[in-house]
Image: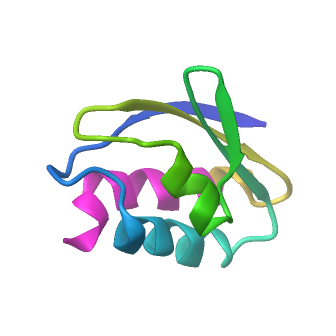
Amino acid sequence: MVTREIKVCNRAGIHARPAANIVKVANKFSSELFLEKGTMKINGKSIMGIITLGATYQSALTMICEGPEEEAMADAIETLFKNRFEE
């Protein structure tokens, strides 16, 4: 299991397009992805789950990757966040 703290860097926060980008990247891997904000823990391969987190600019999230490709998945998702979801 890989656990990392990530921060939302884009001003609009996580809305539909960034959520779709997260799911698109996550689905390239067989590992599971979970995102936590406060007491909420959601499946990172669900667009609606990601949107319900209500992650805004500068929100801190905990990313949890579990499975055979967990390191590669964590790196890819972290890069997506650092690149502001390509927006």
Characterize the magenta stretch by its predominant secondary structure.
helix
Q: Tell me residue 27's x, y (percent).
A: 68, 75
Q: Tell me residue 19's x, y (percent).
A: 46, 65
Question: Quick one: which residue is furthest to the right in this view?
Answer: 67
Q: Tell me residue 74's x, y (percent).
A: 58, 51
Determine if the magenta segment contains residue 81.
yes
Which quarter of the image is occupied by the N terminus?
top right
- Answer above or below: position of 2 versus 17: above
- Answer above or below: position of 1 versus 19: above
Q: How many marks?
A: 0
Which quarter of the image is occupied by the C terminus?
bottom left
Residue 4: quadrant of the picture: top right
Instruction: Give the colouring mode of the picture.
Output: rainbow
As rendered, which of 65 and 35 lies closer to the eye?
A: 35
Magenta segment: 72-87
The residue drawn where x is 50% and y is 61% is 76
Q: Tell me residue 39's x, y (percent).
A: 64, 21
The residue drawn where x is 39% and y is 41% is 55
In the image, is 84 to the left or to the right of 65? left
In the image, is 62 to the left or to the right of 81? right
The residue drawn where x is 28% and y is 50% is 13
In the image, is 87 to the left or to the right of 65? left
Question: Quick one: which residue is furthest to the top in this view?
Answer: 38
- Answer above or below: position of 53 versus 17: above
Question: Quick one: which residue is furthest to the left in this view?
Answer: 11
